[in-house]
Structure formats: C-alpha cells, structure tokens
Amino acid sequence: MKRRGRWLEDGEQVFLTVALATALLWLLLRALAFFCAQMTDHALTPDWAWLYRAGLYLLEARRLPATDLFSWTHPDREWVLYQWLFEAGSAAAYQWLGRAGAVAGLSLLAIALYVLVPAWHARRRGVPVLLTAVLGSLVLVPVGVNFGLRPMAVTTAGLLVQYLLVTRWREGGLGTPALAACLAGLYVVWANAHLGVVLGLLSLGLFALGDARQRHPAPRAYAAPALAAFGATLVNPYGPGIYVYLAGLSLKTPMNRQISELAPPDMGSAPFVLAGALLILFLLDLLRGRRGYAGHEILHLLVFAALAALSLRMVVWAGLFYVLVVPAGLWRAVQAYPHHLAGIRAALAMLARADRVLLPALALAALALATWVVPLERPVRIAHCDDLRPAIRYLDTTYPRDIRWFSDEVAGSCALLHAPDRPVFGDTRFDFYPQDFVLDWFAAIKGRDGWRAFLDDWDVAVVLVSTRRPLAAALRADSGYVVVHEDRHAVVVERRPVAGP
C-alpha cells in the first residue's frame, strides 16, 4: 500500500509538473508572439524617417551637420545631433538588413534584454529560468507599446549592462578599478547614442542610496565608478553642452505637454492593465516582507514605476527593472509557503533541471517568431508612413520642390522617406524646433483660432494633413482653399489665388 501511495503521489507530481510546464510555456510563447506582432506595426515609427536620413548623411558625409538638413522653415538653425552614433549605426544596419530584417533584429534584441539575459541572471541565483522568462515575456506586452527602432533601445541595453556589472561588483566578483573602467567604456558609447545616459547616472545613485546602511559596499565606494561614468559622458562632440541642452529641453514645459510620449500612459488599455497587475503583484510580495529585496532593488523598481506613471516613455525602463528584480522575490515567496505551494515549488524545481536546455530553446523560439512565423502573417509597416505615402507622392509629383507646403508632424517625418529631396515644414524632432513655433504649429493642426494667420505668416501654398486632424475639416470648410487630393488617410489642399483688385 505504501508503494502504491507513493506511486500515486509521484504520478500526481508528474502530472502537476507537465500541466504547469504546458501552461507556462503557452503563456510565454503567446506573449512573445504578441510582442513580435506589435513590433511589425510599431517598431518603425515616423521618427525613424529622420533618424534614418540623418544616419545616411553621417555615413556619406562622415561629419556632423552644423545646421538643419530637412526643413524649409529653419534651415539655418543649429542642430545638436547628440545621438549621432545610434543614427549612423542603425542606418547602416537598416541598409544591410532591410525593413523586415531590422525589425526582426530589434525584436530579438528586446527578447534578449527582457527575457533571456534576465533569466540567465536570475538562474545564477537559483531562480528557475521558466519563471523569469514568463514574467519577462509579460513585461514585453506593455513595453512593446513604446519600444521601437529608436535610440532609447541603447539606454535599455546600457541600463541592463550597468546593472549586471554593479551587481557583480557588489558580490565581490569585480574590483572597483575594473568596474570604473567598464563603466567608462560603456558611457562613452552611451553618451554618443542617447541622452538617456542620465538615467544610467540615476541608476548608479539608486544603487548607492540603497546601500546607504551597508558596510560593504559603502556608498563612498561608488564615488570612483560614478566619476568615471560621468567623465566618460563628456567624451562627445558637444562636451558638457549635452547637459546644457538637456536642461534647456526639460524647461520647455508647454511644448513637452503636447508630446504624447511624455504624457502618462493610458492605464485603461489592456497592456497597461497587465502592467498594473504586475506592479500590484510586486507590491503584495513587498508587503509580505521586504527582507528578501535589497534596498537598491526596491528603489529601482519604485522610482522607475513612478516615472512610468508620469510618462509613457519611461515604461520601457520600468519594465526592465521589474524583470531584473521581481522573479527572485516571487521564487522566495513560493519557497516560503511549503504547505500551500509545495506542489508548485516541486514542479518548478523539476523544470529547473532543464534550465541549460531551456535558454537556448527559448532563443531559437524567439528567432522563429521574429523572423518567420509573425512576419508571414503580418507584413512589417512603418507606422502611419505607409498610409500617408499616396498623398505624399501626389504632392511630390505635382508641385515644385521649392513650394512652401505645410503638414502635421507625422506627415512631415514620413515625407523624409517618401519624398527625400523635398524640405518639410516640420517633423517629430520637437527638441530641435523653437518652442513658440511648435506651440503655434500644434494649435494650427488642431484647427484653433489663428490657424489661417499662421499659414499666411509662413506663406503656405499647399497643405498635406491627416484626415483625422481638426485642421483637415477646417480647410475643407474654408473657401480660400480647395481639395486637390483626398484618400482615407490624408488630404492635400491648395490655397486659392487671391483675386486681383
């Protein structure tokens, strides 16, 4: 009877393990497939147009532009191209890989940053790979709303590399001089690719603050690595000027309020309902007892979650720290409840025996999803630009190059791809244009009082604007303009000549 009872218990445990593995793998692959599908639609945003064009210029001219290359409204304005390294590198990769290849590569990079590397990191601490991988794949759902082929991907990679380096140093596996040297090299690249380098310095500060009560490493031990990192940020074409530029940009509050990416995320949408649920899961585990979390882990997660609640852009980095911090905490919680979760703990422990095989298998699955399965069902798009292409091509083939034409910021950016030889009124480089210009421009796009005067001030002869913009309706209703082209996505309107006396 004892043998029979033991056999039944073993059979139940095997069944539970198989069922748990099936459920977790299904959830993991489903989330990864959803993320890769998001990337086919959102990875290439209208921003990519000017990033790509700037990168091509850098590759061909092999020097930084002194003034604007793209607009007819501000051709003599100084252009601080602080992310030149990303633009040149991504343009070269895009030329080599093509549209689909670039998005597939970006998708694989994101899966590595949020799933594979965190799973490897957590496995070194005894956390089953499958647990971390599932959490990472779920985090990718809200992250995918704002993750794209943009310089912010460099900051994501920089934050991850720095986190791993500092963690290894805190554990005694890396000396302080070696850490300082590694951070210096990292920050030289980072500071020439994205202003998100300041988030790296913030992360170092959170590490030091979290260790404020520790004897080893004491907060003063962070001084040399932090100084090396900060000093390396000055190795760029503009030197300390990048901080002056960033400070000036942050003070343009009225303009920044108009930028959707800087607004809070829509917490009612499905991806951010999931993000809220994941955060609640962490908070419940934290309330259970914070002893399992280091001070810097709590600070990283809470600070970046608070920033993400204020700005959609920060969701990308809040998600990264979530998957670096939470899996180990949840694994400790499972182990702390031997009676209620004994079967699940045993099932996860049994699955952990396959961890060495599971990580390469996940990498292969991600490769298949990103390069084969999803692209077969969903062609890769440049968001909005593919829709606006017919209207832009109509304008480009109908009117001379020097005509003064007006567009919203999205159409302006997309024109840099579809009509590359035609200067634009403006595009999504909001940090480049003067604040007053941007505010008046947005007011005109919204059809507010004064839009006619704004167009007249710039002597605009032709307008190309998305049909969803209020200005489109205002132009149709104005007898001073005539519609010359219209499709489902955009309208082209020409100003009627003023009758003589």
Image (cartoon, grey):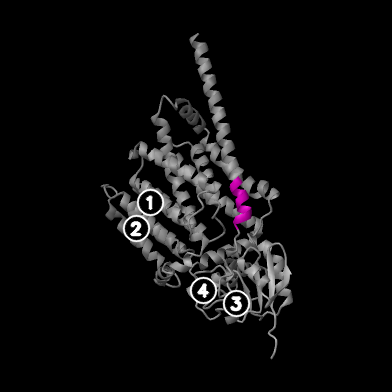
The tag earlier along the polypeptide, 3 or 4, is: 4
In the image, 163 versus 16, the foreground residue is: 16
The residue that disc 4 covers is 433
Asked whether the beta carbons under mark 2 and mark 4 sit within 8 Å of each other, the answer is: no
**Looking at the rendering, which quadrant does residue 368 occupy?**
top right
Q: Which residue is mark 3?
A: 452
Q: Is residue 42 magenta?
A: yes
Query: Are discs 1 and 2 less than 8 Å apart at CB?
Result: yes
Question: Disc 1 versus disc 2: distance between alpha carbons?
Answer: 9 Å
Which residue corresponds to the image point at 53% horizontal and 78% vertical from the top-left?
67
| Residue 405, above or below 223 | below
Q: Which residues are magenta?
A: 34-43
Marks 3 and 1, the one that precedes in the sequence: 1
Q: On the picture, is 466 further left or further right than 257?
A: right
Which residue is identified by label 2?
225
Disc 1 and disc 4: Cα gap in Å?
38 Å
Label whose residue precedes the other's in the sequence (1 or 4) = 1
As shown in the figure, which amino acid type bears the numbered disc 2?
Pro
* Residue that sits furthest to the top in the current view: 1
Query: Which secondary structure class fits the magenta region best?
Result: helix
Label 3 vs label 2, nearer the camera: 3
Mark 1 is on which residue type? Val
Q: Secondary structure at mark 2?
A: helix
